Image: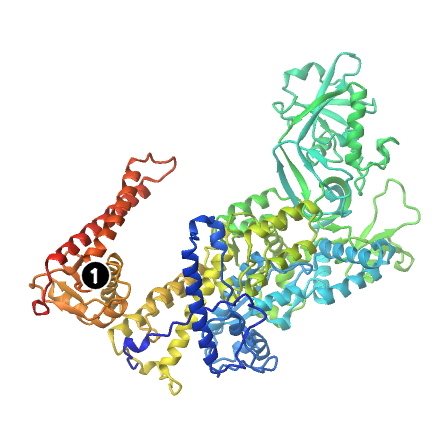
Amino acid sequence: MPHLPLASFRPPLWGLRPSRGLPRSHPISTQSEPNGSAISQRNREAKQKRLRQKQAALEAGIAQKSKSPAESSKAWTPKEIVLYEIPTEHGEKKDVSRPLPPAYSPQYVEAAWYPWWVREGFFKPEYQARLPQATRETFSMCIPPPNVTGSLHIGHALTVAIQDALVRWHRMRGDQVLWVPGSDHAGIATQAVVEKQLWKERGVRRHELSREDFLREVWKWKEEKGGEICEQLRVLGASLDWDRECFTMDAGSSVAVTEAFVRLYKAGLLYRSRQLVNWSCALRSAISDIEVESRPLPGCTELRLPDSPTPVSFGLLFSVAFPVDGEPDAEVVVGTTRPETLPGDVAVAVHPDDSRYTHLHGRQLRHPLTGQLLPLITDCAVQPHLGTGAVKVTPAHSPADAELGARHGLSPLSVIAEDGTMTSLCGDWLQGLHRFVAREKILSALRERGLFRGFQDHPMVLPICSRSGDVVEYLPKSQWFVCCREMGDRAAKAVESGALELSPSFHQKNWQHWFSHTGDWCVSRQLWWGHQIPAYLVVEEHTQGDAKDCWVVGRTEAEAREVAAELTGRPGAELTLERDPDVLDTWFSSALFPFSALGWPQETPDLARFYPLSLLETGGDLLLFWVGRMVMLGTQLTGQLPFSKVLLHSMVRDRQGRKMSKSLGNVLDPRDIINGVELQVLQEKLRDGNLDPAELVIAASAQRKDFPHGIPECGTDALRFALCSHGALGGDLHLSVSEVLSFRHFCNKIWNALRFILNALGEKFIPQPAEELSPASPMDAWILSCLARTARDCERGFLTRELALVTHALHHFWLHNLCDVYLEHWHQPELERHFSRVQEAVQALRALRATYQLTKARPRVLLQSSEPGEQGLFEAFLEPLGTLGHCGAVGLLPPAAAAPSGWAQAALSDTVQVYMELQGLVDPQTYLPRLAARRHKLQKQLDGLIARTPSEGEAETQRQQRLSSLQLELSKLDKAASHLRHLMDVSPSPGEL
């Protein structure tokens, strides 16, 4: 490699230009100013303007300390946007022959590449198979299908950043890579969106349309507005194989869902039963466990709920007396948080060993509302130390009570209807009332009858529907259930045996706990949008009242009719079949995604080549539920695990550690960080959302506080680098926009280095073959060695999937190792150790310059070592020492020579000293008072630290480090003052040197 002197590698000082308040309306055009001369002029003018503004601020006394730390961190200067405006057809390769803009602009850098990548087929495994470096290895992943109704947030962006980095690395290795994109039909969310749209635009309710007409409206909405996620993925640079894009309601997925249902039914792993389910009255549908949010309440808490006319209080324990039959003055007081379920009570239970109630065993109590006789039963599940030790039993509306009732043969009374109103079993005085309105009426009735015994604050956990915000009810419903015990055991053993690797390993505990406590999975949903259940009710003309319904399952109605004929012994043509109107839980189809996306149940080439998947990567504990479903169904249906590794990344929180929430105003669209957005636009997005007025006020206020100036344009590369730079496999990830902005600055450093190197090489430069290159100087050899080490660190990070190791290695190399030389792989550990000594000398020289405030001067420097071999080590690096230390000529002082009089001195080690000339560069009379003032200030800090009593929790090591730091700084100032006083008395002549 030809060696260029360091002096020729000093790049021009390209600054980032301010926008003069118009960042979007006056972009720089690379077409109109190809030579950049006008840009350079504006750059100089802008720099001078910044300097003038800074000086004016200082003169006006605007101190940074007057701002809060949060406000200071949010301040940012808009950058002038440079656009790529060279005419380029969509899908054509970007023209990179023009001069590069002087400053980094994400829009310029990122323009035009993605359509070309897609058109050339770079993201397809078939393309990689044709490359000369192709291996026979495959690597496959699927993107966790996001809901078609939504848009990607920062958590999704983290998933994309990690997955895209991994697939691109595998392509670089020569592997055939398949990364499948897709989206989820999101049954509940999509149906709700379309229903709202129909009502808003046409004043039509869903049930006023036929099912077929409504589904046509949903598909129309999906085609018109369901593509936002794909657009976001392209903006994020996700290198997905778009030709294989899947949707969980497309034809292939429908075939897979039906096949899975039929196979599970035939295997005895899917059945229909009447059981308690999680029910959302607002949605009129069953919901899954994962859609139930357990909200802890510290005590009395008012909540606004859908369809409830007034706020409802929760976190209260109401005490109600149940009179003992036959004893006028005897009663049993029970506590309840849900008095609206009192009409459904069928017994009162106590612990058999609770001595307070031993004399009442076997007695009967009067229901406080109806007067009906209820048994007092004993059960060891009752906790005598809670409340009064007596509990009411409501089997139709409590899972725990349902189990207790089953043990004692109690018949349930369902008193809450699907719509959240009270049923006819409650009597005319309550029937049809909203359940929380009925609550107040019931409490009034209890007061009138003298059976209300008061209420008190009661901490509790309230089940909330995450889809609607309504309180979840437990209602008995005839639904389809998947048996999970056998499949769950296999999934748990897969992790225990190591066949399935969960990373980080701490998720294994949650995995085992979930599968040891999971019940059967209710897969019925009372919706129209989704996969209609392939089950049919055989309608008999003379069905006996006590006979069970006859259900059959088939891939088609014809197949179901054949099954029904065989089951009933009657000709199929004579039978009437009614298909179950319900649809399957969305999680059912999404759990099939890793193999249905590859063509299952057909034996496709993709399924043969890329299944099982090499890796599944997704977000933390919440999607562990989805992963569990995939492992259960995948193992059962395909005979093998759908993947052998699961990589679960952290949850992304804001800089204050808060969970991203629309009601907090901190949910960010990745595009707003990539492109930048004004505060006004952020506020408009909030107003266009579905927040209630109270939440909107809070969210808007928080947004104004967090982003007073809006969000600066950071670019895709900076956002992805920031996300990958965190240890995403550990605790929660706290991300701030200011952090992403700092990585945009890092991108600018890379940009400047690239422009500088290209300028230094010149237009006629022709790269030489790598095998013909060799370092022509110690500096070249050192940087090549550092580069080789960085490449090894990156390789290790990718292999262990610790992308934070990769980003740290790259960041460290560019900022701390790259010193204006060429880059290739060359490793010389001994040279690196030598140069580390040179770097120590550089730091010492810079410290001396700072101590004496030599901002512009370039003083002469001498190095002296008592070891001859060490003297030779420095001799090879004299030129870079002067350049990096911002000094003049650098020379060596013979080992036995006396120290030069009046020069500043610093010890690198016991054997090495550095000397810096001060004569004529520093005025002792002017500088000594400044040193004294600095020393007084530091001494005051030291005295205060010694006198102060350590605060609680303060680490003693930190305190000692601060003490040592202050004492070291004082020592440096004393030494500097001594040198300056000596200078006043001694003025050495050049001949003495």
Question: Horizontally, is 835 left or right of 453 in the view?
Answer: left
Q: Which sits in the foreground, 954 or 132?
A: 954
**Quadrant occupied by the C terminus:** bottom left
Instruction: Find disc 1 in the rendering and name its residue.
Output: 922
Q: Is residue 412 above or below residue 65?
A: above
Res. 729 in view = no
Q: Nearer the viewer, residue 79 or 415?
A: 79
User: What colouring does the structure picture have?
Assistant: rainbow
Residue at 80 percent across and 13 percent down: it is: 326
Q: Would residue 683 be found to the left or right of residue 421 on screen?
A: left
Of residues 18 and 104, the one drawn nearer to the viewer in this rendering: 18
Q: Is residue 387 visible?
A: yes
Give the secondary structure at mark 1: loop
Count the numbered circles shown: 1
Q: Is residue 481 above or below residue 793?
A: above
Residue 558 location, x and y as percent? 83, 62
Front one among 618 and 726: 726
Residue drawn at (87%, 54%), measured in percent from left and top? Answer: 569
Q: Amino acid at mark 1?
A: Val
Using the rendered view, name the quadrant where residue 124 is placed.
bottom right
x and y, in percent, of residue 190 in the image:
73, 57
Which residue is found at the position 67% from the left and 68% from the top?
A: 602
Please identify the quadrant where the N terminus is shown.
bottom left
Q: Position of residue 916 (x, y in %)?
A: 18, 63
